[in-house]
């Protein structure tokens, strides 16, 4: 089988931690090129990870004729322009979250990829866990009955990144190849915002991943806690089928404490997921309880999974497990939440079905 030849745009801390090792591990993929704005940095990464080309600009990497696909792992402010240029050049795209700054931009990328018959994958590792895939099957098969309400609490101790107090990596990672750059998380012009763009991007995409439904209405409140960015976020979302969603998220927690609790309330059963703990339980209205086998530690947040799926989707070995439509749904929620928090109004996106 022909290898998928990949270039990485924005070869920073997450690309060198998750995406590049995934490419290197896959027998049907080849790391062709890496791009960083600093040529010396690009050359060091290319040398250390075995890429043939080190590029200092997006134009330079996209000019390589042998390139089949790119991973856009740069800062959010340039995701749209870089992904659009890659798609226009005929390359498949894996794009980091948040997908773009606006829903209009996200929709343009999704439509462009469809027009050109290219894969566009949004980098959300939660979409590839054994529990997540089974939860989606249960919900969309009707096993829970009619979905009436979903409760989400998502925390991750990254507030020092969002406040610009530290550029130390999060997720408990140590000895990373390269740390995040100043401004990547705390400058709104670069990152878009704080918790809403950085972390709610995951939870918002997960809602559509699980249910298949898009947001219809969003009401939100943010607490910036003295920061230029939102640190505490509380959202009330109505999905297009009428299901009510409460979503609370913050990065201001102790380093040892992470929460990602998803509770799905149906007319026949309740599904309880603890994503950071790797547990899932189904309880029906006859009080029958099904405990699913816990995830192993390396299954809980499978950081390499989006890049591995990207390779296999391009080569026809697997379906796209995290398509751009999920990134678009996430951007609709993010954009509406920001508008609601600013205006104090409920934001309507589409009619209820």
Image: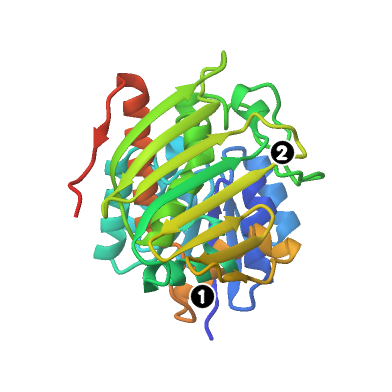
Q: Secondary structure at mark 1?
A: helix
Which label belongs to residue 169?
2
Residue 346 percent across, percent down from the top left? 27, 30
What residue is rendered at 47% in x and 29% in y?
193
Which residue is denoted by mark 1 in the rendering?
Answer: 312
The residue furthest right is 175
- The reply to whether residue 204 is in sight is yes
Dot 1 alpha-carbon crowd within 10 angstroms: few under 14, some 14 to 19, many 20 or more? some
Residue 47 in the image: above or below residue 288: above
What residue is rendered at 56% in x and 58% in y?
272
Residue 261 percent across, percent down from the top left? 58, 49
What residue is rendered at 61% in x and 22% in y?
163
Image quarter in which the C terminus is found: bottom left
Report if the CB atoms under discs 1 and 2 are less than 8 Å apart. Answer: no
- The reply to whether residue 21 is in sight is no
Mark 1 → mark 2, Cα distance in angstroms: 29 Å
Q: Is residue 50 left or right of residue 85?
A: right
Q: Is residue 83 left or right of residue 5?
A: left
The residue furthest front is 286
């Amino acid at each position: 089988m022909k290898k998928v030849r990949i270039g990485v745009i924005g070869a920073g801390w997450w690309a060198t931690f998750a995406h590049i090792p995934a490419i290197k591990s896959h027998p049907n993929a080849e790391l062709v090129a890496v791009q960083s704005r600093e040529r010396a940095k690009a050359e060091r990464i290319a040398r250390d990870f075995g890429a043939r080309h080190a590029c200092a600009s997006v134009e330079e990497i996209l000019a390589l004729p042998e390139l089949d696909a790119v991973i856009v792992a740069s800062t959010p402010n340039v995701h749209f322009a870089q992904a659009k240029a890659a798609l226009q050049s005929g390359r498949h795209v894996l794009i980091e979250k948040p997908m773009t700054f606006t829903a209009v931009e996200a929709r343009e990328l999704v439509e462009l990829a469809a027009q050109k018959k290219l894969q566009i994958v949004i980098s959300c590792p939660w979409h590839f866990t054994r529990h997540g895939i089974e939860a989606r099957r249960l919900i969309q098969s009707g096993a829970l009955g009619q979905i009436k309400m979903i409760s989400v609490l998502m925390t991750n101790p990254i507030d020092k990144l969002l406040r610009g107090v530290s550029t130390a990596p999060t997720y408990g990672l140590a000895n990373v190849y390269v740390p995040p750059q100043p401004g990547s998380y705390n400058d709104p012009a670069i990152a878009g915002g704080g918790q809403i763009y950085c972390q709610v991007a995951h939870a918002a995409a997960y809602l559509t991943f699980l249910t298949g439904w898009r947001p219809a209405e969003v009401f939100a409140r943010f607490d910036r806690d003295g920061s230029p960015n939102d640190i505490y976020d509380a959202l009330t979302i109505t999905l297009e089928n009428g299901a009510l969603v409460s979503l609370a998220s913050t990065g201001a927690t102790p380093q040892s404490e992470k929460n990602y609790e998803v509770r799905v309330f149906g007319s026949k059963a309740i599904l309880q997921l603890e994503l950071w703990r790797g547990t899932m339980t189904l309880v029906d209205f006859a009080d029958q309880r099904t405990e699913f086998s816990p995830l192993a530690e390396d299954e809980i947040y499978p950081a390499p999974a989006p890049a591995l799926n990207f390779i296999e989707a391009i080569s026809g070995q697997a379906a796209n497990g995290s398509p751009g439509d999920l990134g678009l749904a996430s951007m609709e929620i993010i954009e509406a939440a920001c508008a609601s928090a600013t205006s104090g109004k409920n934001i309507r996106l589409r009619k209820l079905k």
